[in-house]
Amino acid sequence: MIHVDFRDAHPIYEQVKEQFRRLIVQEVLSVDEKLPSVRELAAALAINPNTIQRAYRDLEQEGYVYTIAGKGSFVAGSPTLNEKQQQELLKKLSMVLEECYYGKIAKKVVEQQVDDCYKQEKKGESVSDKG
């Protein structure tokens, strides 16, 4: 279910976190479903348990999972961004779009990239996999 690419430039904990986020958003993992224990997943992926713990902690802070002491981590569902978070993301997007404009990237190319991004996410492919 979760795969780690040791040649990927992204840190391993981010790879794990992003894959869980995708599985939760796409509802592959159900609300209240128990996640593998930190030790189980670390052993299965042959990585340090602290790496999994960090990914789980980040997912909990972002509202994707919750933890019950002594029981483990569970899927909370896909959180909805609040108004402030949405505005922050849109501000970042505006900055990127401005750079595209100044870099003379055609509007159609940008629109196609956005369309491709949403299609890939719907199919479960990583946006960053395309380059």
Image (cartoon, grey):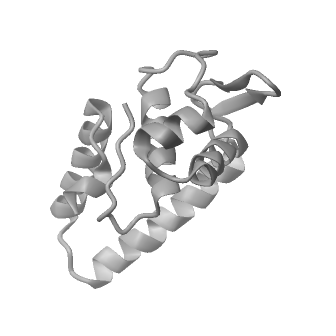
Front-lying residue, 94 or 72:
72
Residue farthest right in this picture: 69
Residue 45 at what x, y percent from top left? 42, 43
**What residue sits 64% from the left and 15% below the top?**
32
Residue 99 located left or right of residue 88: left
Q: Is residue 68 above or below residue 85?
A: above
Front-lying residue, 96 or 108:
96
**What residue sits 69% from the left and 46% below the top?**
57
**What residue sits 70% from the left and 52% below the top?**
84
Residue 89 located left or right of residue 67: left
Residue 54 located left or right of residue 106: right
The reply to whether residue 80 is in sight is no
Quadrant showing the N terminus: top left
Quarter of the figure with residue 40: top right
**What residue sits 30% from the left and 75% below the top?**
100
Front-lying residue, 49 or 90:
49
Residue farthest bottom in this picture: 102
The reply to whether residue 34 is in sight is yes
Q: Is residue 90 above or below residue 99?
A: above
Front-lying residue, 73 or 103:
73
Residue 74 at what x, y percent from top left? 65, 24
